[in-house]
Amino acid sequence: MKKILCFGDSNTFGFNPENGKRFDEQTRWAGKLKIALKNKFEVIEKGANNRCGFTENKESTELSGLIAIKKYLELKPDIIILAVGINDLQKIYDNDEKAIYTGLKALVEEIKKENNPNIILLVPSAIKENILNSFFNTLFDEKSIEKSKKLPEIYQKIAKEFELDLIDLNNIAETSSTDGLHYDAEGHKKIADKLIEFIKTKFD
């Protein structure tokens, strides 16, 4: 049975923007994958709130993608759904476009060292303006919003360079009207439906 590693941030973890709790397995996109694909794939959920993809998060090594990914590569996944990058846009890090490209490239290179698994790179949906009126306005600012709109171009460049599968979530689901950062239940359903279809078509 092939292993699928879902490696991401709070949107992979299933953060519910309405109450700050975790969506259940039947609602969050990675959980829905696990249920839908259980007969042919082992889906491993490894999302974490506040995880950066390539920036050092001093809160913990588990939240620093370049470090955390190493122990999950020991699980020998055949497919990795890579869903990171938004937390790297927090104002405290001040990453510019070059730093985002370089950081994401380093993360992909780290993954490629181990068994060369198939990578499905997800482009995060852009942050909405209403984040500035939410709990998360201490972490993200106007620059973060503008940088999030530039991610598709950067991710497309990386995907082309490494011949990765790419799914732009901007074309599938918007972030919620509650905090402008996380997906609501309907957004998770749309993402799950797209990924299930993609995986069954390509890897089943």
Image (cartoon, grey):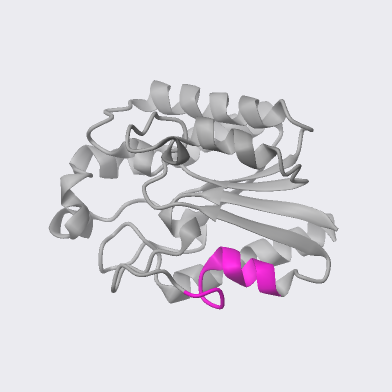
- Of 59 and 51, nearer the camera is 59
Q: How many marks?
A: 0
The reply to whether residue 193 is in sight is no
Asked whether, in this view, residue 127 is left or right of residue 39, the answer is: left
The x, y position of residue 57, in whole percent, is 36, 34
Q: Is residue 54 left or right of residue 76?
A: left
Is residue 39 covered in magenta?
no
Name which quarter of the figure residue 100 lies in.
top left
The answer to whether 28 is drawn above or below residue 133 in the figure is below
Rendered residue at 50%/53% (across/down): 47
Q: Residue at x 40, y 65 (%)?
A: 183
Q: Nearer the viewer, residue 98 or 43?
A: 43
Residue at position x 18%, y 58% from top? 135
- Quick check: is 31 in the magenta stretch? yes
**In the image, 200: left or right of 193?**
right
Q: Which residues are magenta?
A: 24-35
Q: Which image quarter holds the C terminus?
A: bottom right
Q: Is residue 163 visible?
A: yes
Residue 98: give x, y in percent of width and height.
41, 21
Q: Residue at x 45, y 64 (%)?
A: 14
Give the quadrant of the N terminus: bottom right
Q: Position of residue 115 (x, y in %)?
A: 79, 33
Q: Is residue 39 left or right of residue 20?
A: right
